[in-house]
Image: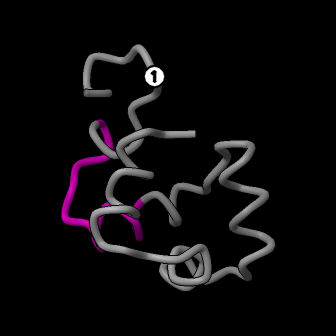
Amino acid sequence: MYPNLLGQKAIHKLTEEDMAKIIGVSRTAYQSKARSGRFTPQECRAYCQYFGKKFEYLFAADGDEFAS
């Protein structure tokens, strides 16, 4: 998963249900996407807009330049 996305989830005290609503999917679908790390471009945009963060930051993987 993406540590910065999880960090934003924690900072904003969002549940998995909340995260699912942001991208317009069910909680079960969100859980599957979160495990696989496979979000559509539209879903990525929705998270970037919601959290006010750039894609490069929010979706940096462990070991990426923007991960910390």
The residue under the point 60% across, 77% down is 20
Residue assigned mark 1:
62
Q: Nearer the viewer, residue 22 or 41?
A: 22
Tag 1: Cα neighbours inside 10 Å, few (<14), some, or many (≥20)? few
Residue at horizontal 79 percent and vertical 58 percent from the top:
32
Figure coloring: one colour
Write the start and end of the magenta stretch as one range: 45-56
- Quarter of the image for residue 27 reads bottom right
Q: Residue 5: x and y, percent?
A: 41, 51
What residue is rendered at 60% in x and 73% in y? Answer: 16
Left or right side of 27 for 68: left
* Quadrant of the rendered image containing residue 50: bottom left
Please state, as top left, top right, bottom left or bottom right, where the C terminus lies in the image: top left
- The picture quadrant where one finds residue 25 is bottom right
Question: Percent position (x, y) of residue 35?
Answer: 73, 47
- Relative to 44, residue 55 above or below: above
Q: Is residue 38 magenta?
A: no
Relative horizontal placement of residue 19, taking residue 13 as reference (left or right): right
Give the left or right position of residue 54, taking residue 2 as reference. left
Residue sitting at x 30%, y 72%: 12
Task: Point out residue 4 in the picture as x, y percentages from the top left corner.
Answer: 35, 43
